[in-house]
Image: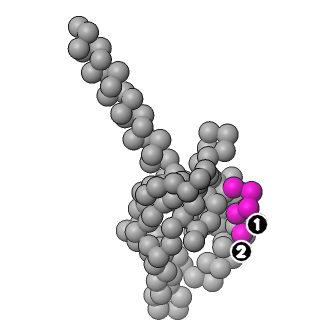
Amino acid sequence: MRKTLFLILFLSLALSACASADQPAQSVENYYQAILDGDAERAAALSCAEQEANVQMEIDSFLAVDAALDNFSCEQIGTDGDMALVSCTGKIVMSYDGEDQYLDLSVATYQVLEQGGDWLFCGYH
């Protein structure tokens, strides 16, 4: 009985640690989906204060094209002070007048900050 209780406690702690590690990565994925959906309110809500000013500009940059995420996924790769660092794979495919162009999302490291229990997209470097 004691071993079972210990095992259950250990597994629940391990699963909660995995879930919280995925949250910074999920916030980057959600942010880019909101940008491509043209949802400024949602993208701003997913952003830290410094990034909110860039939301409309990023949305506007995709207005003239059909844009979609392709093979996009992210994972947390570390921390830098309070920031979680996230690496992504995949690209944004932008179609205009029958011609496709690609924006590789793997070339940057994304910064995510936890505020009030939420992980917020703060930009990239």
Secondary structure at numbered mark 1 = helix
Examine the residues drawn in magenta and state their main secondary structure.
helix
Amino acid of disc 2: Met
Q: Quadrant of the N terminus?
A: top left
Secondary structure at numbered mark 2 = helix
Task: Name above or below for residue 119 compared with residue 32.
Answer: above
Does residue 71 appear left or right of residue 54 in this picture?
left
Does residue 18 appear left or right of residue 97 in this picture?
left
Q: Is residue 93 visible?
A: no
Quarter of image, res 84: bottom right
Amino acid of disc 1: Ala
Identify the magenta region.
48-54
Q: Quadrant of the C terminus?
A: bottom right
Query: Does the magenta segment cover residue 52?
Result: yes
In the orientation shown, which residue stands out farthest toward the front? 81
In the orientation shown, which residue stands out farthest toward the top? 1
Give residue 53's mark: 1
Viewer-side residue, 29 vs 106: 106
The x, y position of residue 44, in whole percent, is: 70, 58
| Residue name at image x 33 percent, y 25 percent | 10
User: Label 2 belongs to which residue?
Assistant: 57
